[in-house]
Image (spheres, rainbow, N blue to C red):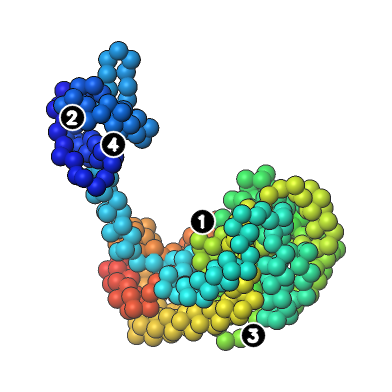
Amino acid sequence: MRQITITFNKVDKLYLQLYEYIKDEILKQNIKQGEKIPSKRVLAANLNISLNTVITAYELLIDEGYIISKEKQGYFVSNNVFSKQDLNVKYNKEIKKEKEKIDFSTKNIDVTTFPFNNWKKSIKNVLLNDETALINKTVHNGDFELRYEISKHLYENRGMNVDPNQIFLGSSIEYLLELLIPILEIKNIGVENPGYKKMSLIFNNNNINVKPLYLDNEGIIISNNDNIDALYVTPSNQFPTGIKMSLARKNELINFSIKNNVYIIEDDFDSEFRIQNKPLQSIYSLSNRNVVFVSSFTRTISPALRISYMILPLNVSAIYNKRYISYSNTIPTFEQKVLADFIKNGFYIRHINKIKTIYRKKRELIISILEKYPYLFKIYYKNNYLSLIVDIIPKINFSEIKNEFINNRIDIAFLSDYYFNKESNNHLIIGYSGININNIEESIKKVIEIIKGHIS
């Protein structure tokens, strides 16, 4: 049993000094796991302090799991204590790895673009005008003020006339759809191929048969022979190809949905980030009879801001309200109030316009670099919003190049990753929403070097 010696200062409470000393000795492994420590009375006598001081320090150590008490045996260091030094080493390694990662994915945002100053202003506005936002609950469909501001934004920027009472807020599109699916009674759903496989996983998890449907240059291809009762589409900016669904195809989908009583789930994926053209008319604005419109703020503001919404047809919203009226909303009231203020004061649209300019510069820089290698790349879909699709012209070994991207911590995907069948092609998807513009040139050149090294 180790002797415990400590020199107390005259500032801090004695029991806290004793607690910190023993804890640090355990974490530094100067006192080993399973080792017995002095009894309360012995330690109090050795250190010339009161018994109550030792009791209080030991109780803190027991509560936090550093030591345990065994009846009639004494106190022992717990066997479940990890070394603080080992934890710090592991933590620092993880942080270092993350900083070195090259992010050409399509799922992240550039943290330097977050509107910190205006977001802080909205936080202050809410705290000054409505302190209860920190403690009050929100109704099941979300804060009315936020729903109103969303409807106003959609009208002014998308030409959509939406009743706030038809808007339903939730922490993610996936969560909202899982509440909606039982109401729509979907059994078979058509999805885009290539497409967003995560949503197909959600459908599969809800016992829905997923039918992949191919695309042409106007969007998803459907026929009356397709045995489906719902469609999931991204018409404004098809993911991952960037195809913009034509007006004729949208009307074709609407006619198909009405004739066959098929619901259309319209995901407004990245529509805010149009490069030059005006916003495309949504399917919902053409006919909301069988159309569910879903969108999210995770891409426009931050993935950490878990606020999404869906707009339901009148008949469906009535059933949804009746079924889920007693449910708690999954978004903190305070966050909803802050976002409502952010949109109301024009911060949101200013933020969108600012990052559109940044993304355009990133895009132009990547294109300018790739165009120097016409023998390596052919660039497709120049009107895609937050990514570029390029064809690698020479023959390459996909497995080897993918492994090398992973080994070099380059997060990048091939178009073939988003097909539901094993369809191979040379199309590389270069996302630029998450990478800092100052790192693009060096990072793209790293990708080019790797590809060059695998040309057969």
Q: Secondary structure at mark 3?
A: loop
Give the residue at x 61% y 86%: 277
Residue 271 visible to the viewer: no
Which residue position is annotated with label 4? 15
Comparing marks 1 and 3, which lies closer to the viewer? 3
Q: Amino acid at mark 1?
A: Lys
Comparing marks 3 and 2, which lies closer to the viewer? 2
Disc marking residue 48: 2
Q: Secondary structure at mark 2?
A: loop
Disc 1 and disc 2: Cα gap in Å? 75 Å
User: Counting residues from the N terminus, which is met first, the one under dot 4 or under dot 3?
Assistant: 4
Q: Nearer the viewer, residue 307 or 333?
A: 333
In which image quadrant can residue 391 be found? bottom left
Which residue position is annotated with label 1? 422
Q: Secondary structure at mark 1?
A: loop
Residue 160 visible to the viewer: yes
Q: Amino acid at mark 2?
A: Asn
In which image quadrant can residue 33 be found? top left
User: Counting residues from the N terminus, which is met first, the one under dot 1 or under dot 3?
Assistant: 3
Disc 4 and disc 3: Cα gap in Å? 68 Å
As drawn, the residue found furthest toward the top would be 72
Q: Amino acid at mark 4?
A: Tyr
How many residues crowd mark 3 within 10 Å: few (<14), some (14–19), many (20+)? few
Which residue position is annotated with label 3? 278
Q: Residue 443 location in percent, x, y?
A: 32, 73
User: Counting residues from the N terminus, which is met first, the one under dot 1 or under dot 2?
Assistant: 2
